Image (tube, helix red, strand yellow):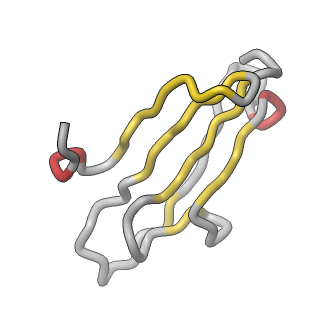
Amino acid sequence: MPDSVEVQIKVIVGGVTLDDYTLERWLTNAAYNEIGEYNFRLFHPNAEQASTCHTFKLYQDGVFVGESFNGDQNDFEE
Protein backbone atom coordinates (compact mmCIF):
# COMPACT_ATOMS: atom_id res chain seq x y z
CA MET A 1 0.00 0.00 0.00
CA PRO A 2 1.40 3.45 -0.81
CA ASP A 3 2.67 5.57 2.09
CA SER A 4 0.10 8.21 1.13
CA VAL A 5 -2.82 5.91 2.07
CA GLU A 6 -4.42 5.69 5.52
CA VAL A 7 -7.26 3.41 6.60
CA GLN A 8 -9.67 4.15 9.43
CA ILE A 9 -11.37 1.22 11.17
CA LYS A 10 -14.36 2.38 13.22
CA VAL A 11 -16.79 0.35 15.34
CA ILE A 12 -20.36 1.54 14.75
CA VAL A 13 -22.39 -0.56 17.17
CA GLY A 14 -22.70 -0.15 20.95
CA GLY A 15 -20.98 -2.59 23.28
CA VAL A 16 -18.34 -3.74 20.76
CA THR A 17 -14.73 -2.50 20.85
CA LEU A 18 -11.46 -3.10 19.12
CA ASP A 19 -8.96 -5.27 20.99
CA ASP A 20 -7.43 -2.24 22.73
CA TYR A 21 -10.92 -1.17 23.94
CA THR A 22 -11.11 1.77 21.54
CA LEU A 23 -13.73 2.43 18.86
CA GLU A 24 -11.44 3.75 16.15
CA ARG A 25 -8.01 2.88 14.71
CA TRP A 26 -5.92 4.47 11.95
CA LEU A 27 -3.59 2.32 9.85
CA THR A 28 -0.64 3.34 7.73
CA ASN A 29 1.56 1.28 5.46
CA ALA A 30 3.75 0.36 8.45
CA ALA A 31 0.86 -1.54 10.11
CA TYR A 32 0.70 -4.23 7.42
CA ASN A 33 2.78 -7.41 7.50
CA GLU A 34 5.19 -8.52 4.78
CA ILE A 35 2.36 -9.93 2.61
CA GLY A 36 0.12 -6.86 2.98
CA GLU A 37 -2.25 -8.12 5.67
CA TYR A 38 -3.43 -6.47 8.87
CA ASN A 39 -5.22 -8.57 11.47
CA PHE A 40 -7.35 -7.15 14.26
CA ARG A 41 -9.85 -8.43 16.79
CA LEU A 42 -13.19 -7.11 17.95
CA PHE A 43 -14.50 -7.76 21.45
CA HIS A 44 -18.20 -8.60 21.46
CA PRO A 45 -19.91 -9.04 24.85
CA ASN A 46 -22.12 -12.10 25.16
CA ALA A 47 -24.98 -9.88 26.36
CA GLU A 48 -24.87 -7.76 23.18
CA GLN A 49 -27.54 -8.70 20.63
CA ALA A 50 -26.11 -6.69 17.72
CA SER A 51 -23.42 -7.78 15.29
CA THR A 52 -19.83 -6.47 15.24
CA CYS A 53 -20.62 -3.74 12.71
CA HIS A 54 -17.65 -1.62 11.70
CA THR A 55 -16.48 0.46 8.78
CA PHE A 56 -13.29 0.82 6.81
CA LYS A 57 -12.63 4.27 5.32
CA LEU A 58 -9.77 4.84 2.92
CA TYR A 59 -7.98 8.17 2.54
CA GLN A 60 -5.15 9.05 0.18
CA ASP A 61 -3.18 12.23 0.85
CA GLY A 62 -5.97 13.20 3.26
CA VAL A 63 -8.69 12.87 0.61
CA PHE A 64 -11.56 10.44 1.24
CA VAL A 65 -11.50 7.64 -1.38
CA GLY A 66 -14.13 5.13 -0.24
CA GLU A 67 -15.84 3.22 2.54
CA SER A 68 -16.82 -0.37 3.30
CA PHE A 69 -19.39 -1.53 5.86
CA ASN A 70 -18.83 -4.84 7.65
CA GLY A 71 -21.15 -6.78 9.92
CA ASP A 72 -24.92 -6.95 9.62
CA GLN A 73 -25.44 -4.75 6.57
CA ASN A 74 -29.20 -5.25 6.46
CA ASP A 75 -29.67 -2.29 8.80
CA PHE A 76 -28.14 0.22 6.37
CA GLU A 77 -30.30 2.15 3.96
CA GLU A 78 -29.08 2.45 0.41
Q: Nearer the viewer, residue 66 or 1?
A: 66
User: In the current view of this chain or complex, which residue is farthest to the front?
Assistant: 63
Residue 72 coordinates in the image, percent (x, y): 24, 50
Residue 16 coordinates in the image, percent (x, y): 44, 69
Q: Residue at x 63, y 68 (%)?
A: 22
Q: Quadrant of the C terminus?
A: top left
Left or right of 41, for residue 25 = right
> How many numbered tags mark residues here?
0
Q: Residue at x 79, y 21 (%)?
A: 4
Residue 42 coordinates in the image, percent (x, y): 50, 60
Q: Residue at x 52, y 68 (%)?
A: 17
| Residue 41 drawn above or below residue 50 | above
Left or right of 56, for residue 3 = right
The quarter of the displayed image where residue 55 is located: top left
Left or right of 34, for residue 14 = left
The quarter of the displayed image where residue 61 is located: top right
User: In the current view of this chain or complex, which residue is farthest to the bottom?
Assistant: 47
The quarter of the displayed image where residue 35 is located: top right
| Residue 30 drawn above or below residue 22 | above
| Residue 60 drawn above or below residue 41 | above
Q: Quadrant of the N terminus?
A: top right
User: In the current view of this chain or complex, which residue is farthest to the top?
Assistant: 2
| Residue 17 drawn above or below residue 74 | below
Q: Residue at x 78, y 28 (%)?
A: 29
Residue 56 coordinates in the image, percent (x, y): 51, 39
